[in-house]
Image (spheres, helix red, strand yellow):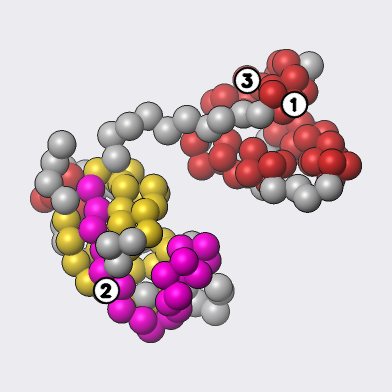
Amino acid sequence: MKPKTQFSATILQNGNMNAAFVEFPFSTEEIFGKKGQVKIKAKFDDAVEYRGSLANMGQGFHCLGLTQEIRKKLGKTFGDEVSVELWEDLEERVVEIPEDVQIILYENLEAKELLEKMSYTHRKEYIRWITDAKKPETRENRKIKMIEMILSGKKGV
């Protein structure tokens, strides 16, 4: 395993959106041998773990997103300092598909094949959207809507 990289950074806001990121202050090419996206595992403030990617924003640096969930766990927001420890994630990324979703996919093989060809992130989005439903009827409606969206070529929710 490659060594872990550590740094401190200010949590920045992406435009006017409720989206946050930190700039990666090193060269991904020197550390990871990659110019584009780098899949990583990270630990923020030595407490909150995260699995994501360093994204090349085309502005001379890579950034690491901090989801609302992570910011909430850290008790931090835009402008706050955060310590980051990260390393390359070489494990395969697998989305666990619940049995009821597997059933509807086997009834719609074209949608199943299209879903399997999607990126890990898009597959994860679809499944999370379904599993986050609070009511059973919402979950059922989302499963049907997912099939329609996939078949219409929509990559994510």
Residue at x-position 53% and y-position 32%: 95
In the displayed structure, does residue 157 sit left or right of residue 81?
right
Asked if the residue under mark 1 is in contact with the one under mark 2, i.e. CB atoms within 8 Å, the reply is: no
Q: Secondary structure at mark 2?
A: strand
Query: What amino acid type should be assigned to the residue bearing mark 2?
Result: Ala
- Residue 55 at what x, y percent from top left? 35, 54
In the displayed structure, does residue 121 sit left or right of residue 157?
left
Q: CA distance from mark 2 to mark 3?
A: 41 Å
- Checking the image for residue 113, the label placed there is 3
Asked if the residue under mark 3 is in contact with the one under mark 2, i.e. CB atoms within 8 Å, the reply is: no
Q: Which residue is mark 2?
A: 9
Residue at x-position 39% and y-position 52%: 50
Image quarter of the N terminus: top left
- Camera-nearest residue between 147 and 152: 147
Query: What amino acid type should be assigned to the residue bearing mark 1?
Result: Asp
- Checking the image for residue 100, the label placed there is 1
Which span is picked out in magenta?
A: 68-87
